[in-house]
């Protein structure tokens, strides 16, 4: 491997595909380990990407892959636990294994994905384990940079798209924590910060919170999604007890659209207190500039037509 190689852990996910594409565009060779190669079909055809089917939880494997890499990027994260994929395993254990891989492979530079308000003493297990992972990275002795975004939006997101699907089938939207506030950031902006930080020495040893230009309540985001999709529905804001009951019910249904841990995470508004970090040299994208391109009826029909064309139907 040459010195322009970057190892991306969690590279097959929503943010990962955007980070990998930007790395390729800047001439990097990218290694993406994954347990299931078929989950990375969208990356396999990229010219300088090597998708490697392996056990990402094995620090020895990661150490070999990291050898001679210029940097390691850890994007691994989950919003909900399923089976063996627990917050502790994915957030804390994998962060430790990634750090060990950097040291075994002789890599100094580590970029780490965290979350806004990550804190070992946070309100939810999600935020607590993200906070503990940050502590591991900071104590690693490596040249680290941590990114802590608010909710991330984009064409393949699991946030606005979820509400779009629900609004299509529900006559009324019963909404837990309707007044919780978010400051959504576009996935492309998050990816740009990760890749640009490889060239900015001043980002070493820094933790960056990343938010878009505008904050919204959850009610406002759901209402906006309904307006874009053409499925405007009445919104009933649930109080604390009914919010807990709804989360309890949903976490036991297939798909786990919401859990009580998700609800706990929303106790603190996911907004930034200051401006977007000036080091990266750009202003974040507005939600209104991007969301119509994947939520509007015309955009949905276009994606469906593309799918039919690709499947030969």
Image (cartoon, grey):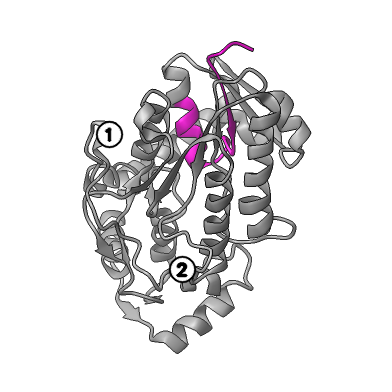
The answer to whether residue 8 is magenta is: yes
Q: Is residue 75 above or below residue 133?
A: above
Please provide the residue range marked out in magenta. 1-21
Image spot of residue 38 (x, y percent): 68, 33
Q: Which residue is farthest top?
A: 2
Q: Nearer the viewer, mark 1 or mark 2?
A: 1
Where is 225 relative to 10, above or below? Answer: below
Decide which of 202, 277 is in the foreground and name it: 202
151 in relation to 262, above or below: above
State the residue position of label 1. Answer: 279
The residue located at (41%, 76%) in the rendering is 176
**In which quadrant of the rendered image does the C terminus lie?**
top right
Residue 294 seen in this snapshot: yes
Query: What numbered label is drawn on residue 232?
Result: none
Quadrant in the picture for residue 243: bottom left
Q: Residue at x 54, y 71 (%)?
A: 261
Q: CA distance from mark 1 to mark 2?
A: 29 Å
Where is residue 106? Give x, y as percent. Answer: 64, 24
**Residue at disc 2, secondary structure:** helix
- Which quadrant, please, contains the N terminus? top right
Q: Earlier in the sequence, mark 1 or mark 2?
A: 2
Q: Residue 277: which quarter of the image? A: top left
- How many callouts does the rendering have? 2
Q: Which mark is residue 265?
A: 2
Decide: few, some or many residues near mark 1? Use Cα within 10 Å; few <14, some 14-19, many ≥20: few
In the displayed structure, 44 sits above or below 231; it is: above
Asked if residue 53 can be seen in this view, the reply is no
Q: Dot 2 surroundings within 10 Å: few (below 14), some, or many (20 or more)? A: many
| SS class, disc 1 | helix
- Tell me residue 303's x, y (percent): 42, 38
| Residue 242 in magenta stretch | no
């Amino acid at each position: 491997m040459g010195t322009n190689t970057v190892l991306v852990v969690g590279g097959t996910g929503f943010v990962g595909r955007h980070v990998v594409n930007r790395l390729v565009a800047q001439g990097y060779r990218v290694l993406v380990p994954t347990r299931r190669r078929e989950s990375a079909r969208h990356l396999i055809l990229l010219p300088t990407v090597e998708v490697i089917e392996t056990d990402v939880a094995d620090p020895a494997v990661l150490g070999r892959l990291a050898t001679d890499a210029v940097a390691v990027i850890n994007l691994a994260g989950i919003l909900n636990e399923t089976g063996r994929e627990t917050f502790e395993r994915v957030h804390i254990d994998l962060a430790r294994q990634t750090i060990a891989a950097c040291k075994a492979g002789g890599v100094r530079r580590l970029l780490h994905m965290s979350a806004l308000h990550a804190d070992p003493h946070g309100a939810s297990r999600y935020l607590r384990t993200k906070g503990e992972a940050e502590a591991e990275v900071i104590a690693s002795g490596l040249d680290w940079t941590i990114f802590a975004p608010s909710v991330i939006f984009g064409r393949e997101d699991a946030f606005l798209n979820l509400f779009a699907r629900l609004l299509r089938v529900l006559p009324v939207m019963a909404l837990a924590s309707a007044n919780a506030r978010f400051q959504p950031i576009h996935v492309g902006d998050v990816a740009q910060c990760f890749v640009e930080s490889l060239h900015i020495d001043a980002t070493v040893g820094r933790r960056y919170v990343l938010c878009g230009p505008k904050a919204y309540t959850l009610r406002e985001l759901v209402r906006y999604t309904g307006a874009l999709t053409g499925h405007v529905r009445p919104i009933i804001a649930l109080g604390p007890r009914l919010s807990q009951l709804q989360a309890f019910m949903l976490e036991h249904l297939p798909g786990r659209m919401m859990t009580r841990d998700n609800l706990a995470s929303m106790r603190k508004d996911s907004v930034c207190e200051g401006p977007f970090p000036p080091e990266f040299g750009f202003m974040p994208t507005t939600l209104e500039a991007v969301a119509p391109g994947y939520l509007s009826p015309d955009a949905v029909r276009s994606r469906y037509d593309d799918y039919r064309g690709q499947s030969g139907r």
